Image (spheres, coloured by chain):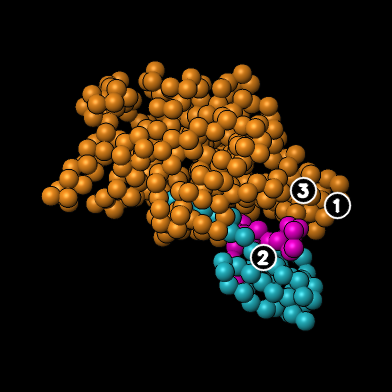
Chain colours: A orange, B cyan
């Protein structure tokens, strides 16, 4: 297959766009789409100080690379969750550190174990919903580092497949509250929070992986988070890919049309309270992170006695 | 000489001349979920494998 722009050998066939592209034109288009998402959804300004949450995986490192290429002032944040199984945290941390070092970028490393005395496996003690526990921890740390570091926005590597599969999950359960909050830019509802933006939301997972490979980004490819095995999100992504295989462009249409109509879903505005333990915004007296910390410590004490 | 296909630690042999899209169909994989690489070059699904070549299929899907 030949590149639709220059007739060189193509490296990817974007069936949704009826476009085959060579390395050079694929990278060029990838950056154009990132910039398009930033403008279309008003994700950030050229002068914004951006904190990119990096995991060592393809999406977050591709995002950091793309934002830097486009001239944004972006620092990275790696949250070390202390997952020792398969050496997961150590390997992913090394990938993030090496990426930053090679490009002369600033990476902030936040160790959950060092800061709170508990690793992710200890925090999820007794909880079946490991991915939601991980989400609570990451959100708390991201907000804290963004606030303390004086950043304007927090950027995550969520791609089109992530967004479409979350949307499908919300709709399958008719969770209209969560659907109402899903957006490429999630506004801050409290002065201690920062807007969260998803500049890769118009690009598929295959496109971000291809970008990472073409740009020579050394990302965690062989390893998956040991806790994500059998995750529902993977099953939903595979289901969407089956549909995409049959009808190219469905994922993009599903997500972008949702964004046009998402106002039909409503969510309650959270009350502007602050957690009495950490001082961060909270729906209740204690925020979900501090509740998790308390529960895990209590369970740990019970086990030790 | 057949061509070799590698995916998630497994290896299989296919006849030279087989297209990447046929390999994906044979393995029940969606072209949306994998990237095909021969040597250091990424290839599209219409690529025909040659004698002795190794096709590496890289999963694009991650979750959690």
Q: Which residue is mark 3?
A: A23
Q: Which residue is mark 1?
A: A8
Q: Which of the two residues, A103 or B48, is positioned nearer the viewer here?
A: A103
Q: Which of marks 1 and 3 precedes in the sequence?
A: 1
- The numbered dot on residue A43 is none
Magenta segment: does it hold B39?
A: yes
Magenta segment: does it hold B22?
A: no
* Mark 2 Cα-neighbour bin, 10 Å: few <14, some 14–19, many ≥20: many
Residue shown at 45%/58% (left/top)? A86
Which residue is situated farthest in the left direction here? A305
- The numbered dot on residue B56 is 2
Which residue is situated farthest in the right direction here? A7
What segment carries the magenta color? B27-43
Q: CA distance from mark 3 to mark 2?
A: 18 Å
Res B50 visible: yes
**Position of A230 relative to A191 (above/below):** below
Q: CA distance from mark 1 to mark 2?
A: 22 Å
Of marks 3 and 2, the one in the foreground: 2
Of marks 1 and 2, the one in the foreground: 2
Q: Secondary structure at mark 2?
A: strand
């Amino acid at each position: 297959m030949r590149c639709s722009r220059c007739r060189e050998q193509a490296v990817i066939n974007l069936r949704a766009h009826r476009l085959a592209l060579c390395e050079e034109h694929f990278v060029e288009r990838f950056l154009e789409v990132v910039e398009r998402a930033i403008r279309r959804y008003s994700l950030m300004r050229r002068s914004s100080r951006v904190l990119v949450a990096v995991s060592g995986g393809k999406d977050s490192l591709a995002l950091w690379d793309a934002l830097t290429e486009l001239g944004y002032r972006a620092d990275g944040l790696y949250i070390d969750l202390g997952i020792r199984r398969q050496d997961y945290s150590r390997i992913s941390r090394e990938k993030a550190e090496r990426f930053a070092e090679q490009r002369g970028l600033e990476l902030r490393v936040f160790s959950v174990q060092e800061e709170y005395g508990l690793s992710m496996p200890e925090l999820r003690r007794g909880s079946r919903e490991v991915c939601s526990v991980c989400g609570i921890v990451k959100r708390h740390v991201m907000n804290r580092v963004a606030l303390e570091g004086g950043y304007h926005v927090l950027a995550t590597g969520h791609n089109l497949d992530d967004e479409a599969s979350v949307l499908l999950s919300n709709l399958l359960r008719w969770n209209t509250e969560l659907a109402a909050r899903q957006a490429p830019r999630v506004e801050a509802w409290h002065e201690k929070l920062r807007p969260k933006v998803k500049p890769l939301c118009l690009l598929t997972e295959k496109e971000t992986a291809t970008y990472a490979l073409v740009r020579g980004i050394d990302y965690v490819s062989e390893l998956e988070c040991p806790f994500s095995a059998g995750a529902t999100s993977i099953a939903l992504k595979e289901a969407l890919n089956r549909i995409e295989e049959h009808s190219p462009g469905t994922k993009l249409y599903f997500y972008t049309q949702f964004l046009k109509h998402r106002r039909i879903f409503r969510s309650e505005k959270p009350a502007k309270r602050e957690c009495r333990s950490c001082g961060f915004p909270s729906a209740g007296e204690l925020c979900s992170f501090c509740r998790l910390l308390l529960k895990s410590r209590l369970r740990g004490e019970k086990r030790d006695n | 000489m057949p061509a070799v296909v590698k995916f998630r630690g497994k290896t299989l042999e296919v006849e030279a001349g087989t297209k990447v899209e046929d390999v994906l169909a044979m393995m029940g994989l969606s072209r949306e979920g994998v990237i095909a690489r021969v040597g250091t070059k990424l290839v599209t699904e219409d690529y025909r494998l040659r004698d002795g070549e190794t096709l590496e299929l890289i999963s694009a899907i991650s979750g959690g």
